[in-house]
Amino acid sequence: MSSRSTETTVTFLHAFHMKGLEQPQPAGTYLVVTEEELLDALSFPAWLRTGTQLHLPAIGLPALSRQAITIDPDDLSAALLADGPSRTAPPAASPHPGGH
């Protein structure tokens, strides 16, 4: 079965917390990697999301180590909506160089 990963970035204007994170994270731009598998049984190409990871810390922040935390995409959307009153929907994820 074919698989692919897509790298995107999301930006939080304020500190945030969501399921799967041990502590609140600071405002910043974060890398999100989505893994998908091609569904072969259909007569048209369709991809099934098999995992989503949020990379910590935010891009550009100094760190001794980096980690990828498995998250629920719905929790990410909810955190983005809660980030500010001007957000009515999650922003379109911007492509990040290096995605497959």
Image (tube, rainbow, N blue to C red):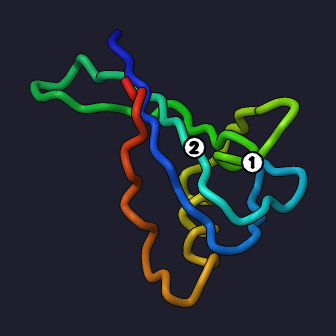
What is the tally of numbered marks visible in this picture? 2
Location of residue 98 (image quadrant): top left
Residue 58 percent location from the top left of the image: 69, 49
Q: What is the quadrant of the C terminus in the image?
A: top left
Q: Nearer the viewer, mark 2 or mark 1?
A: 1
The image shows residue 75, relative to residue 58, as above or below, that is: below
| Residue nearest the viewer, comparing 60 with 32 | 60
| Residue nearest the viewer, comparing 70 with 86 | 86
Report the side of 45 relative to 76 (left or right). Answer: left
Which amino acid type is shown beneath numbered disc 2? Leu
Location of residue 44 (image quadrant): top left
Say what secondary structure mark 1 lies in. loop
Residue labelled with disc 1: 61
Residue labelled with disc 2: 31
The image shows residue 88, relative to residue 15, as above or below, that is: below
Q: CA distance from mark 2 to mark 1?
A: 12 Å
Say what secondary structure mark 2 lies in. strand
Residue lying at 67% horizontally and 40% vertically, measured from the top left = 55
- Disc 1 residue crowd, few under 14, some 14–19, many 20+, Cα 10 Å: few
